[in-house]
Amino acid sequence: MGLSQALNASLSGLRATQAGLALVASNIANAETPGYTRKTLIQSSATTGLIGTGVRVEGVNREIDEYVQRQLRVENSGASYASTRAEFYQRLQSLLGTPGSDSALETVLSNFTSALQTLSTSPDSYSARTGVLSAAQALTQTLNSTSNGIQALRADAEAGLSDAANAANDAMQHIADINRQLGGMSPNDAAAAALKDQRDSYIDQLSQLMDIRVVDSGNNQVSVFTTSGVQLAGVTAARFSFQPLGTLTPNSLYDSDPSKSGVGTLMLATANGGGVDLIASNAIRSGRIAGLIEMRDQTLPQAQSQLDAIAAAMASSLSDKTTAGTAATSGAQSGFDVDLSGILPGNTFKVSYTDTLTNTQRSITFVRVDDPSALPLKDSGDPNNRVVGVNFSAGMTSVQNQVQAALGGYFAVSNPSGNTLRILDDGAGGSIDIGSVTATKTMTGLSAGSSELPFFVDGPDFYSGAITGQGSQAVGFAARVSVNSALLADPSKLVAYQAGTAAGDSARPDFLYQQLTSSSLRFAPSTGIGTAASPFQGTIGSFLSQVISSQGEAASAADRLSDGQNVVLNALQQRFNDGAGVKIDQEMANLLNLQNAYAANARVLSAVKEMFDLLSKI
Amino acid sequence: MSVIGVGAKSQSMVQSLVDMRAQLDALQQQLSSGKKATTYAGMGVSRGLGVGLRSQLASLGSYDQTITMVGLRLNVAQTALTRVSAIGQTVKSAALDAGTLNADGKTVAQETARTSLDELLDLLNTKAGDRSIFGGRATDRPAVETADHILNGDGVRAGLSQLIDERRQADLGADGLGRLVIPPAAAGTVSIAEDAAGSPFGFKLASVSSTLSGATVTGPSGSPPSASVSLASNPTAGQTVSFVFNQPDGTTQSLTLTATNDSPPGPNQFTIGATPDDTAASLQDALKTGVGYSARTTLSAASAMEAADNFFNVDTTHPPLRVAGPPFASATALTAGTAADTVTWYTGEMADDPARSSASARIDDSIVVNYGVRANEDGIRNLVKNVALFATVSNDATDPESTARYTALATRTSAALAVPPGTQKVDDILSDLASAQGALGAATNRHQQTRSTVSGMLDTIENVSPEEVGVQILALQTRLQASLQTTALLYQTSLVNYL
């Protein structure tokens, strides 16, 4: 106990005040620095025995509410996921055009039907004919460009995934590096606090990209996992790899089998050199990456399939002709002959019959599928309306056998001549009665005597909805659909359905107009409109209106979700900032305190000095 | 999302100011464009309905265009057909007047008919815009040939005049007896026979009747049909024998010969001679003279009528018919004229379906009006046929029989132009077109009502009310100003400023 002790105590006070002052200065300087948390000084009184011998600076404390921080990270992923979706939906909306504008799909479609209506009134008018063709071209061009726009969006999502993978790698690497640096430091080290701020900032970046779980493993260390439990960063960092494809077509779709996949996949390289496909294992459920994957693999392909369905409906309804089979009998058996010449891959013939035991109407639709790798076709899911693929490449005998095998023993299938197939029942009073056999074929000639014509074609090929091992011809048809060039070369074929058709004969224009505006078509549930049990049935116009309606609703829902997420995120951010942010007024008040404390300590020091002076004068 | 700055406390405040500014921009855009949004997403839940309504408006627009176009065609067609009908009336009444033949062998009425024919054919070639309206579906070419080609042919192909002439030769025969054979009387019997079985030409024996005492009539029977009158004893004066002949155009001509004691006998009389054989010889002579006169007058007119019918009655199953020849005088059959040797007056579309359905227009979702007309429809064809026939037949002014021949023709023409009930008239076509016109008018009214309803509904879906947006802008402006002022105030009231 002595004056020197008081001197030391006041010196420690000066040191502590200086440290406090430095902290205040640093807090104020970093008030607007992202990721910076307010630091406070941890100090304790130094005692010797029962007597205080000064003040000791223990370290620096980060003012942080860890509960809010955890919640913030979850919402961060959610908000980032929602805003990614909203952003892509918004861009998809702009592809569909301004409602009612000249370039909107609905407008070009109704321009086309109006042009057909004009042609139907004046079939002989050359300008009405070219009017139909130019309206049809505008329609196909709109479908093409909208399809290309959708694929460009998918390519953007692909590039976005690549960027996200790199950003995630960067963040994980930094987290691991900082974890290692922090390994040897004390928790209250001022340098450690700064490093933790940095590490939190990287974790926040990662949480924007994907949903993560952060576990504090003590000793300044944190481990980052995916919500499904795969470790991303600890002392070492995992690595994502992603091989993006520059251009995407409607046919390049994701498949968990890498040899079939047409797009890049997100692989996580584990420490032992193995890899986990994060998309196949559905490991990422939120954040920007999940949003991009959803857009690339679900939302945008579905939008594409809606356009494809419109294009396919336009092409098929104008080109496909259904003819009924002719009645045939053999002894007690009765049935139908159906002519299968000219049937293209994808064309169908349908056997409708009554099961007399249960009095049930059934039908089997046979589809020409010449690619053996596409056979057998996927089950239609409806036992009363089966769909069966038939390979025509080996000739009619083979077709006969395939049809016989699919129909079963109650039917007798034969090939009386040429391409005719005869399908007979098991006689009156038997187990089945055949009601009808019809064949639907795509017309390939412009003036073959029927109103149907291949108005829209698939590049150089006719569109018949062929199914091959690579998929259906319908996939991406909207990107390829064009007006038949033979028709463009000879617009008179819009009227002349056979040689010698009079110039004013409106039979074909009437047919085209009717098909587009009144004929009720069935649309596949893969378009997202309608279900397998009750598929959407309606005109092309009503389907388009459904598409636009559902796309618009999805986009505005995505927008609302994103807005809602941002509100939640902002509120949390505010709360977090209230605890962790630098408040200038508070720092100023601290500054005054520290000034006072410094002055007081200095006063003590000078008092001790005076006392030492007094002592030395004695 | 930017990097979250935990220290960046001013960010959220700035963000809300930016949001308000963006909202203000959006409202300003709504106010200037009048539309709720530029994307379907911004249209609200009725966006699907909006698509449907816009397409309904578009189809109403094209229906209205169709109605205007079809209305124009109907007007043109009706004007032309009204005039066609009037021409028929004019020619019909002119034909009734007894005319005198001019030097060129035609009456004034015939000259008028000739100019009427030109006008008629011109009317039938009427176009609405670029479209022939009387040719059914063949709208890209004239519906009928020119009057000159129809009447006189074009050098290679024969016209109506030539067909009439050929038919006249075939009907009258080389000896001018209308293809009847009247051999000299033998054993008190006068016989008369057609020259060939099944020939369509000349007189056909319909019946023979007699009040002659002591006469036996047999026939007409056999193939070719023949009839005879046998006189067992002489008749008394005033007793008659009548022959009735069918003519090619379906009319009948009767020849009644009266017994007289005068010698020589007057027209259509025969002298009762000393013996029945002498009487029969006189009867044969009178019969021959009477048949010859009828052949040159009524049969000629009937022949011309039938020739015109053969020429004009063309459709998918009927080519123009002409006499198989030469030689024509002994021909016994008709043959189909080909496109190479005979003019086909109607050049439009020939089809079996009703003419009206050869042009149809959809004027509403479920209403189709049929308004096609073909110039070879019965009503128009009959009119053109008779006017052309009347205009083309000429008679030698110096021939004393010309007047009778002309009268026979004029009576027939006039009767044919007064269309018998049950056959189509031009007026029937007109009334069909008028009912189509009526349907157009009704559809137009309906469309107007639908359009105003649909537009009103669409307005509520896609447009904004300027007043509402104005008020919103005002409210937002107040809020934005207040926020800006408060923000400024907040930054001023920092402890920093008071140290």
Image (cartoon, coloured by chain):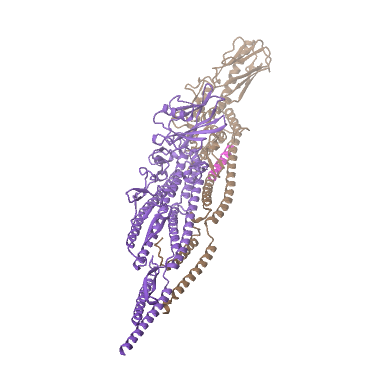
Image vertical order of residue B142 relative to residue A82, above or below: above
Examine the image and state in which quarter residue B1 appears.
bottom left
Image vertical order of residue B474 relative to residue A475, above or below: below
Residue numbers of the magenta segment: B71-88
Residue B343 x, y percent position in the rendering: 47, 31
At a point 47% along the width and 59% down the height, the residue shown is A565
Residue B211 x, y percent position in the rendering: 68, 16
Report if residue B369 is visible in the image.
yes
The tint of chain A in the picture is purple
Magenta segment's dominant SS is helix
Query: In front here: B227 or B102?
Result: B227
**View extreme (bottom): residue:** A618
Residue A80 x, y percent position in the rendering: 43, 57
The tint of chain B in the picture is brown
Check residue B76 for magenta coloring: yes
Check residue B463 for magenta coloring: no
